[in-house]
Amino acid sequence: MVRMFLILLIALCFGGKVWCAQTLRIGIQETILQGQEKELINETISSLKLKLNRNIEVSEFSSKDLQKAIQNNEVDLFISSTPFFIAEAKSGARDIVTLVSDRAFDPNQGLSALVLVKEGANGLNSLADLKDKTVVFNPRYGQETVYLIKGELEQSGKDSSLILNKLTARDESVKELLDDLSQEKLDAVVLPSCLLEEEAEKNEINTLNLRVLNEKNHPNLLCLHSTSLYPSTTFAMLPSVQAELSRKLRLILLGQEAIKGGMYWGTSSDYDSVDRLLRSLDMDAYASERKWTMKNVVNKYWYIFVGFLLLILGLMAHSVRTEALVKKRTAQLQASLKQREKLQVQAAKTEEALGKLQRLGTVSQISSLFAHELRQPLNAIRCYAYSLLKQTMKAGSNLDKEKFASGLEEINEQAQRADEIIQKVRDYVKDKSRDLTQVDLDQILKKTIESFSLGHPDCEIQVQAVSAKVLGDPLEIELIISNLIKNAYEASVGKKAEPQVYLKGERKSGNFQIEVWDNGPQLSEEQLSEISNSSGSTKADGLGLGLSIVKTFVERHGGTLIYGRSPLGGLLVSFNLRLVNGEKGNGS
């Protein structure tokens, strides 16, 4: 009996006498029901129930919840603002009809936003002036009004996120918002277009002290507005609606008569303006795909990841093969490394022996240095000894003991200096390091001049304020100055005028520079070049050994020996010594 009933029911359905479709689910964006559209929507639902002869389930949703219902296939049709409809393009939503009214004649141009400010408000002449201002809107009237303001700013090249950084949502009536605006509790109010006119018809609203910001005029919209125009409320369907039902829905809705207020359903042909608006705000249906998330990157560049994976697998295979070859070669290299270590040890020993031979090879040079430097202290000893001998022979028993003791002291001092020279030569041969100490240049200079003048009374030495403390070896500095004075003297001997030696000291960049020159003959460019390049001698029988010793000692003190032409045309030799830290001697 039950089987026969089911067969009969199916036959009736296919025969067209009974409509056997499932429940038709309609979702409505709740912000649409805040204006006069509510009357048209209620009339539309009643008409659909009557003419479709099927069960219709109607639900109100917030924008966020309606979006979830569409994604979860919980509705077949929905009524929303046009920006919301365009943003759901990926879900397969298609428009059926669009709202038309006696205030908005063209369904392509029925939506706009209104911005009101107080009359006489200073500095508010355009939407861009809303930066850092308190701007209020009621979310019950739709978030779309904010999108329209932001889109208008973006189109004019302004950053809407900075301009509307004080945007505030307040759930208050139009009258309450405008009263606060009149009392200057806020700077601007944003409303959907035509809502002000609808409220003015119901309630007494004083707008005499208010002004429309960025006011626009368009013949297709008889309401105050501040932005460009876009399609109005849209009735849309999802892919779950079959083609036959889609056709019937469109016929029913377009055939519906206008209600009180002149509202009815028409068809919109241009949604490009809304699409551009949402794209400029990065809120269109494909905005999430343009974001650089890991999922989007993988979906877009999956072939690169596959290629990279294959490359890694190839590298791993190559690594395994290379490891096997390395193990094979390691055994061979280990034997070679051991042999290399033995050779390195032998090379180190050979290098050490070579260093000893090189130091021993300097013996001939050191012997010359030894003979050269000992001549001066030995000459001084001979002079003092001769002087004492003559004094002894003259004085007899009336010997001046004080002078005699002074002479013996000088002989002892020169002998000690000769011993220091011998020790210095020994240290040089052994490559023995020495410590630099604080040296008083003034004392060394006096001592050197006194020793030199003893054997050369005919030489006049002129000194220009050499007074400083430097770091160095006292004996080596004395040998440097002694050799330079001696060379200068020998260069000026034989000239008609008395031989004169000049010595000058001055500070330069943390160092103390000493210059020595004489009144000897002028040097040619060839002679100056020869001395500079080889440290040679200008004397016919000279070996250049004195300047060689000076150069060695100067370089051991971290300085450089520099040759030039003196103010008198002869040779000028200069070198630097490092000043003691904080030393403030007179170098003028």
Image: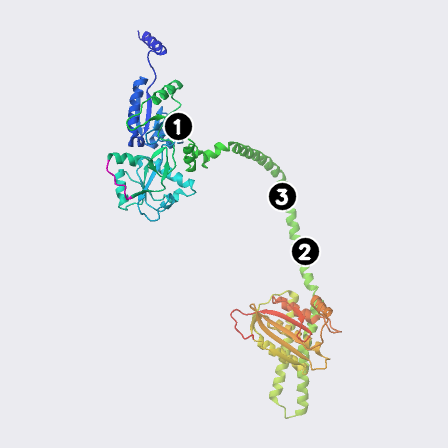
Q: Secondary structure at mark 2?
A: helix
Residue identified by numbered label 2: 350
Instruction: Quickly name the residue at label 3.
Output: 334
237 vs 297, left or right, is left
Q: Position of residue 466 (x, y in %)?
A: 58, 76
The image shows residue 240 at horizontal and vertical percentages of: 38, 22
Residue 560, compared with residue 57, is above or below; it is below
Check disc 1 and report the residue beneath it: 268
The answer to the question of whether label 2 and label 1 lie on touching residues, with beta carbons closer than 8 A, is: no
Residue furthest out toward the front: 219
Residue at image position (67%, 61%) is 356
Residue 140 in sight: no
Task: Tell me how far mark 2 sits from mark 3, CA to CA.
Answer: 24 Å
* Label 1: element kind: loop
The quarter of the rendered structure image containing the N terminus is: top left
Q: Are marks 3 and 1 in contact (CB under 8 Å)?
A: no
Q: Which residues are magenta?
A: 203-209
Which numbered disc, 2 or 3, marks the residue that appears first in the sequence?
Answer: 3
**Which amino acid lies under the numbered mark 1 shown in the image of this protein?**
Ser
